[in-house]
Image (spheres, coloured by chain):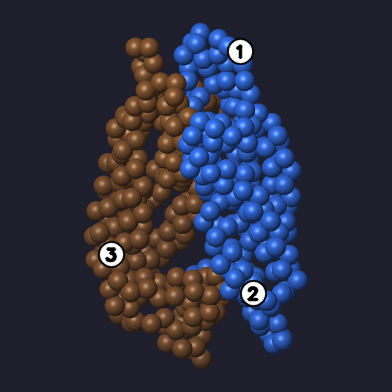
Chain colours: A blue, B brown
Amino acid sequence: MHMRKHASLSTTWALIAAAILLYVPANLMPMMVTASLLGSQEDTIMSGVVFLWQSGSWPLATVVFFASVMVPLLKIIALIYLTASAQRRSRHNLIQRTRLYRLVEFVGRWSMLDIYVITILVALVQFQGLATIQAGPAAVAFGAVVVVTMFAAMSFDPRLIWDPLSDPTPRRPDHD
Amino acid sequence: MPAPDAHLTLPANPVACHECDLLQSEPRLAPGETARCVRCGAVLARNPPDSLDRSLALTLTATVLYVIANVYPLVGLEMQGRQVEVTLIEAVQILWKGGVEPVAALVFITALLFPVLELLMFLLVLVPLRLGRVSPRLATFFRLVRSVQPWGMMEVFLLGMLVSLVKLSHLATVLLGPAFWATAALIVVLTLAARAFDTRLLWQTPVAESGR
C-alpha cells in the first residue's frame, strides 16, 4: 500500500546541500528590476519586505518576510536536524520530530509566494515609456530553492524516525 | 504489495501507518469519523459521509471554476485612463519573454498545469468508481494523483496576487477580475472535494464485489 523511499537519507542530504548553495544568491541578488522615467531600481527580497513595511502594510511585510526569508531557512535547518537524527538512529523526541516533518511538508509551498508576486508585478507593470518591471536573477535561484527544498522534504522518509525502535530485534523487515 | 491473507498472525484489518510503519488494526468508522495512528497521530483513514457523490459533484464544480479562472482576466490596473488586465497565461507569457524562462515554467506548472492535472486525474478515478467499474489500477493511479497534489499551489498564488496588488495600489487603481474570484472559490471547492473522498473506496469495493 505504501512504498518506502529509496536511498532516502543520501538523496535528502544532496538536496539540502543544493538548497543551501541556492539560498545565498536568492537573497543577495536582485529579485526585481524596476525601470521608470526616474531611472532603474533593483530590489532584493529583503528590500521588497522593507518597502512593504515602510508603505504601511506591515501585516503583508511580515507574511512576505516569513514566507520568503524565514521559511526556506528554517526548512533547511529542520531538514538537517531530521536527517542527521534519523542517521544517528536517535530514539529521542520521536513524536516531536514527526510533527516537525509534517510542518516542514505543509509550510514549504508558501515560499513560492514571492515568485507569484513577481509574476503579477511583471505582467501588470508594462506601461511602455512610463515604467516596466522585470524579474531579476534571484527569482530563478529562489524558485530553485523552493523546488529543491520541496524535493528534499519529499525524499525524507518519516518512517526512518521510528525505525530505531525496532533495532534490538535482529529481524528488520526491509520493504523495497 | 503482499496479499492481505499473507499475514496470518496479525489483528483483523491490519493497517501500516504510512508515516511510522506501526501495524495496528483499523477500527470501524462511523460516517464523519477519522482514524489516527495510535503512535504518531497520522491520519490513517476517514469515513466522509456520501463520499463518492459529494467528491464527484465538487470536482465537477471545480472543473467549471478552473475554466473561468483561466479564461477571464485575473487582475488589472487602471492608470491615467489606461487599463491593463491579464489572464494567468498572459502573465506567464510576459514572464517568459522577459528572459526568466525557468521562473515562467515554474509558475505555469504550479499555478496552471498541475491544478488541471489534479482535477482531470481525480475525475478519472471518481467517474469509473461512480459507475461501479473498479480495477486495481485505479489505486496505483491514485498514488500518482497524490504525488501531483503538493505541486498545485493555487492558494499561494492567490496570496501572491494580493501582495502584488497591495504593492501596486499606491501607483494605480487595482481591479480584481472574474478569474480572481473563481480561483478563490476553486481553492475552497478543491479542498472540500479532496476531503470528501474516502480513499478506502479504492481498496474496499473490489473485495466486496469478489464476495469475500
Instruction: Tell me what residue is drawn at x 35 percent, y 40 percent.
Output: B183
Q: Which one is in front, B146 or A140?
A: A140
What is the x, y in percent for residue A86?
70, 69
What is the x, y in percent for residue B98?
56, 21
- Mark 1 nearby-residue class (10 Å; few <14, some 14–19, many ≥20): few
Instruction: Tell me what residue is drawn at x 61 percent, y 13 percent.
Output: A39
Q: Are marks 2 and 3 in contact (CB under 8 Å)?
A: no
Identify the residue position indicated by label 2 in the image: A93
Q: Which one is in front, B137 or A123?
A: A123
Q: CA distance from mark 2 to mark 3?
A: 36 Å
Circle 1 sits in a helix, a strand or a loop, which is it? strand
Q: Which one is in front, B87 or B212?
A: B87
- Label located before the other in sequence (1 or 2): 1
What is the x, y in percent for residue B97?
54, 21
Circle 2 sits in a helix, a strand or a loop, which is it? loop
Instruction: Tell me what residue is drawn at x 56 percent, y 51 percent.
Output: A108
Amino acid beneath label 2:
Asn
Q: Residue A102's image quarter?
A: bottom right
B182 over A129 or under it: above or below: below
Would residue B99 be visible to someone looking at this image? Answer: no
Would residue B159 be visible to someone looking at this image? Answer: yes
Q: Are marks 1 and 3 in contact (CB under 8 Å)?
A: no
A19 over A50 or under it: above or below: below
Q: CA distance from mark 1 to mark 2?
A: 55 Å
Q: Nearer the viewer, mark 2 or mark 3?
A: 2
Circle 3 sits in a helix, a strand or a loop, which is it? helix
Amino acid beneath label 3:
Ser
Chain designation of label 1: A
* Residue A39: assigned label: 1
Identify the residue position indicated by label 3 in the image: B51
Taking the image as shown, residue A22 lies to the left or right of residue B18, namely right
Amino acid beneath label 1:
Gly
